[in-house]
Image (cartoon, rainbow, N blue to C red):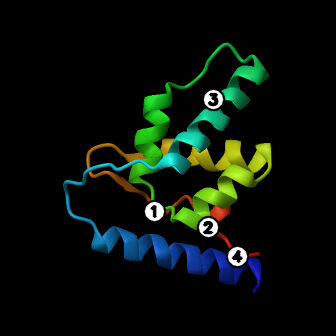
Amino acid sequence: MTEDEANEKASRMIANHREAKTHYRKTTFNDLHLKVADRYSDLFKSLDLGYVPEKIDILISLGYSPLSESDLERLLNGSDEDLAHDVSGINSHIDRTTKIMDETFVPRCMRDF
C-alpha cells in the first residue's frame, strides 16, 4: 500500500467515524488510553520544556478520537516521535464542542505503511 493510499484509507475511516457520531458522546477510557497518556506525559516531562499538558485533557482527546484499540497499541509501542506527533495532533484537532476530530489530521498510528 502506498502512502497516498494509506492516507486515503485513514481519511475514509475518520469520515466514517464522524458520520457515526451523534452530537453528544460520552467518553470512555480503557487501560490503553491511560497508558498512552502516561507515556506522553512522561515524554513531555523528560523534554523539560517548562510545560506539560494536563493528563485529563489528553485523556479526553484520546477518548474522542477515532483510534481503535489496535491504533492505541501501535501508539503505545511506537517511537517517541510518533507518540508526540499523534497525541499532540489529536489534542489540537479535536473540536471540544462536537467531540469530533477534524479530517485535516491523520495520526500516524492509523496509517498502514
x and y, in percent, of residue 101 in the image: 42, 56
Residue 35, by quadrant, is top right
Hey, what amino acid is under mark 3? Ser
**Label 2 amino acid?**
Met
Callout 1–callout 2 Cβ contact below 8 Å: yes
89 left or right, relative to 109: left
Which residue is painted at 74% across and 77% down in the image?
3
Q: Which residue is mark 4?
A: 112
Q: Which residue is at a point 67% across and 36% down the rendered structure image?
A: 39
Q: Is residue 22 above or below residue 99?
A: below
Q: Earlier in the sequence, mark 1 or mark 4?
A: 1
Question: Residue 71: horizontal and vertical position, in percent?
Answer: 60, 63
In front: label 2 or label 3? 3
The answer, for residue 103, to whether it is visible in the render is: yes
Residue 13 horizontal/vertical position (percent): 48, 75
Q: Secondary structure at mark 1?
A: loop
Mark linked to residue 110: 2
Q: From the top left corner, tell me how far across and down residue 85 is, in percent.
A: 68, 47
The kind of residue on which mark 1 rests is: Pro
Q: CA distance from mark 4 to mark 3?
A: 26 Å
**Which residue appears at 68% of the width and 60% of the height?**
74
Residue plotted at (61% across, 34% down): 38
Give amino acid for label 4. Asp
Which dot marks residue 83? none
Give residue 41's mark: 3
- Report helix, strand or loop for mark 3: helix
Q: Determine crowd level at label 2: few under 14, some 14-19, many 20+ residues with C-alpha closer than 10 A.
A: many
The vertical placement of 5 against 41, above or below, is: below
Q: CA distance from mark 2 to mark 4?
A: 7 Å
Query: Residue most toward the top?
Result: 50
Q: Which residue is mark 1?
A: 66
